[in-house]
Image (cartoon, grey):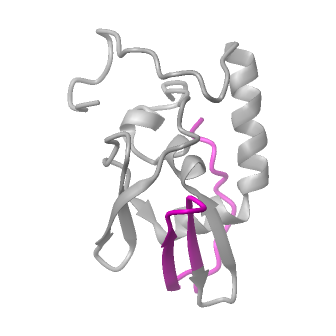
Amino acid sequence: MNAVAQAPVPARSQPIAVTVHQASRVLEIGFADGANFRIPFELMRVYSPSAEVQGHGPGQEVLQTGKREVSIVALSQVGHYAVQPRFSDGHESGIFSWDYLYRLGREQAELWQRYERRLAEAGRLRDDPMPLAGGGGCASHGH
């Protein structure tokens, strides 16, 4: 699922406003180039840029399920280039650069379709609970 396309992001993809909307479970982010996106927490969680979700290379992605009701319980700024959300399911290792968030916002329709296709291919449902981790995972990740 390492699937956020690498299409060029405008050089002015600096955010001018970031708002966490708990009730609707979206991160609203406005950029200096005038783009404004409402990115669902679930989309952020299933496409987290962390190694826990993306793996350490192509083909190692971990299909995320049961994330529809996930919320963001904390959002920390990382330097001047990113934010790091802590999700209600305990996931907190993804660092979302401004470019990555821009891509999530711009390409969310395609990303949802890709996610639904991967679910269907795996015979899983969006609300299925995540399977318990097996013994072959990366030991550096606590969840």
Determine if the magenta segment contains residue 10: yes
Q: Is residue 86 left or right of residue 108?
A: left
Asked whether the viewer can see residue 11, the reply is: no
Q: Considering the whole magenta stretch, tell me its main secondary structure.
A: loop
On the question of residue 76 being in view, the answer is yes
Tell me if residue 90 comes above or below residue 36 in the rendering: above
Q: Quadrant of the C terminus?
A: top left
Tell me which residue sits at (35%, 16%) in the image. 133
Q: Is residue 80 above or below residue 129?
A: below
What residue is shown at x 32% (from left), y 11% (from top)?
136
- Residue at x 51%, y 85% (from the top left corner): 17
In the figure, 143 relative to 8: above or below?
above
Left or right, 15 with respect to 39, comes to left
What residue is rendered at 58% in x and 73% in y? Answer: 28
- Left or right, 55 with reference to 21: left
Q: Looking at the rendering, which quadrant does residue 10 occupy? A: bottom right
65 shown above or below 87: above
Residue 124 location in percent, x, y?
66, 17
Part of the protein shown in magenta: 1-29
**Which is nearer the eye, 41 or 111?**
41
Q: Quadrant of residue 118?
A: top right
In percent of width and height, residue 75 lies at 35, 66
